[in-house]
Amino acid sequence: MTVLAVLLALATAVSQSTGLALPAPAPAPAPQMVYGENSGPVAGVSPPIPTASGRTGSLRGSTNLLGANSPQPDLDTANSAIVPNPQSVNGQDANADLGLYLDFNSANPPQPNRGGRGGTDPGPRTYDYEKLNPDLYAPPGTDAGSTPQFMFNMGLAHNRAGVGNHSGWARQQNQDVLPVAKAMAGVDMRLEPNAYRELHWHTAAEWSLVLKGCTRVAALDTDGRTYIDDVCAGDVWFFPAGVPHSLQALEMGTEFLLVFDSGAFNEEATFLVTEMMLRNPVEVLSKDLKANTSAFDNLPKDQLYIFNGTPAPKNIAEQNLTGPAGARTGNESFTYHWSRQQPMEVEGGSVKIIDPLTFPIASNFSASQVVIHPGAMREIHWHTTSDEYAFFIQGSGRITVYVAPSASRTYDFTAGGVGYIPQGSSHYIENTGTEDLVYLEVLQASKFTDISVAQWLALTPRQVIKDHLHLPDELLDRLPTEKPYVVAGNKNLTAMAGGGQAY
Ligand SMILES: *[C@@H]1O[C@H](CO)[C@@H](O)[C@H](O)[C@H]1NC(C)=O
Ligand SMILES: *[C@@H]1O[C@H](CO)[C@@H](O)[C@H](O)[C@H]1NC(C)=O
Ligand SMILES: *[C@@H]1O[C@H](CO)[C@@H](O)[C@H](O)[C@H]1NC(C)=O
Ligand SMILES: *[C@@H]1O[C@H](CO)[C@@H](O)[C@H](O)[C@H]1NC(C)=O
Ligand SMILES: *[C@@H]1O[C@H](CO)[C@@H](O)[C@H](O)[C@H]1NC(C)=O
Ligand SMILES: *[C@@H]1O[C@H](CO)[C@@H](O)[C@H](O)[C@H]1NC(C)=O
């Protein structure tokens, strides 16, 4: 229970060093601080409550404490860094190269070792991070070398609140927090019922998956054509760079993920209709919109960003304006009702794809939504022409990213997690939880493609594979000539520790 154990050792006389002529008497030893384990809810470090009023003591110590001047510590009574009774979880003592998923939830506390490699951890530490990230804390033996950081979670992002009460919020991941993510950035945005994301535009193109509720989107293109639609959870919209758009939550509110085609995108730095009006001389506004200057007296004094609005009429036709240039329709639609697309069912889950073959306006966005059953795994694969932006919608899973020529690192993900996998780097996504894992893969590509390792090995001359990898015939006989996408697996991720199998 103790969050930070502060042992106030009573001042005991330092054994006088013999023969050492000190310029001044040795200072009394200071209270010893021992950093212990945090078992509080999250980061719950309770500082000691000060009991003294006023100041005592001084900020700096004496030069008598310099190594050459100070008496040696008494090693018999010094602070111990031995961790008593360290315990292992299922699979932790198995060979490190098996790399079994370690469920640290039952560990009190987790220890950072695997198959004997690593050690114990006397602290400082926060158990919750370690339980969420067992593959960082006790990495598989196969992880090697140095790789960029590939993981972020929206739970670590600053949340910007909207204007007024209960209008919504937004939080983002961009290169500031995940430098490797050069081609794409993401924003998780919440609009409370009837709230708006202020009319705006930006220099990046915007692709979005609705996560909850329904959103009314409207836009105007460069030819003066209009577009309006209602999109609900599982549906997608796309706005090209510079196209101004509005987003309004319908009566049940909404939340969506936005993916931009630039890693440097900053949600705090978009062009806003309020600011545009406020940043031009009123004389110019008057001329431009042919109105008395008094017409601008009630402009908001500041940007609105996210704010509460008048409920949108349920009948969308009431808000469907069309100018002489007409409306965007058919292949030029800015939305796709992806929620209505049935996925392809495969052995360990399901997959569905949206890319320019069916949603042409998003000409460089290709995505798949993957469902992975417990124990199952999105097979080892890579993308040939694009980095991958992965967003975790439900459940938990882990990814090992292999980086040429000889490095790899394994990360654990939970809902709200962002993974970023560079072009060409092989990776898998293994469900490490007890519910279906649902995640999104987004590529900057005109078609969703990948290379399946299992299919590649199956469709390469057998002698070539055997000369390289020395794999047995029984394995080669069973390789799939069609991409599995998601392979089924044993729900018990540590079964191998007891002689069971993974698949
Ligand atoms: C906003 O919420 C706070 C806290 O609930 C409340 O005190 C305040 O009156 C609310 N303001 C408005 C304008 O509703
Ligand atoms: C809006 O109007 C255009 C032009 O009449 C039409 O093609 C389009 O389907 C309408 N949109 C909706 C959502 O009703
Ligand atoms: C514009 O303002 C002038 C004087 O301020 C007023 O006489 C006139 O009626 C106004 N015009 C309109 C269209 O409001
Ligand atoms: C839409 O685009 C697809 C792919 O480019 C094409 O096959 C299809 O004919 C187009 N449909 C219409 C209505 O233009
Ligand atoms: C698609 O995105 C990639 C990565 O940002 C970029 O290199 C490529 O030029 C883009 N292709 C098109 C057709 O815009
Ligand atoms: C998983 O397998 C291991 C090794 O055989 C066994 O010790 C453990 O109890 C199993 N876990 C479950 C939940 O069945």
Image (spheres, rainbow, N blue to C red):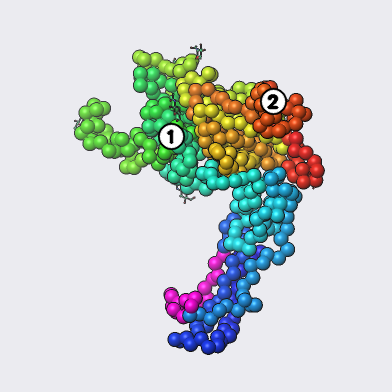
Check disc 1 and give the amino acid type: Ser
Q: Earlier in the sequence, mark 2 or mark 1?
A: 1
The residue at 71%/51% (across/down) is 115
Task: Give the residue pinned by disc 2.
Answer: 463
Residue toward you, 227 or 293: 227
Check disc 2 and give the amino acid type: Gln
Q: Is residue 256 magenta-colored?
A: no
The answer to whether residue 198 is left or right of residue 10 is left
Magenta stretch: give its range. Answer: 46-68
Q: Secondary structure at mark 2?
A: helix
Main secondary structure of the magenta stretch: loop
The residue at 69%/24% (across/down) is 462
Specify the label residue 262 is tagged with.
1
Residue 67 visible to an observer of this rendering: yes
How crowded pointer 1 is (Cα within 10 Å; few <14, some 14-19, many 20+) is rated as some
Please report contact status of discs 2 and 1: CB closer than 8 Å, yes or no. no
Residue toward you, 440 or 166: 440
Assign the N terminus to one quadrant of the image. bottom right
Using the numbered discs, state the Cα–Cα distance from disc 2 to disc 1 in whole angstroms: 44 Å
In the rendering, at what x and y percent does residue 74 appear? 60, 79
The residue at 53%/78% (across/down) is 30
> Number of marks in the image?
2
The answer to whether residue 131 is left or right of residue 52 is right
In the rendering, at what x and y percent does residue 415 appear? 60, 41
Specify the label residue 467 is tagged with.
none
Mark 1 CB within 8 Å of ligand 5: yes
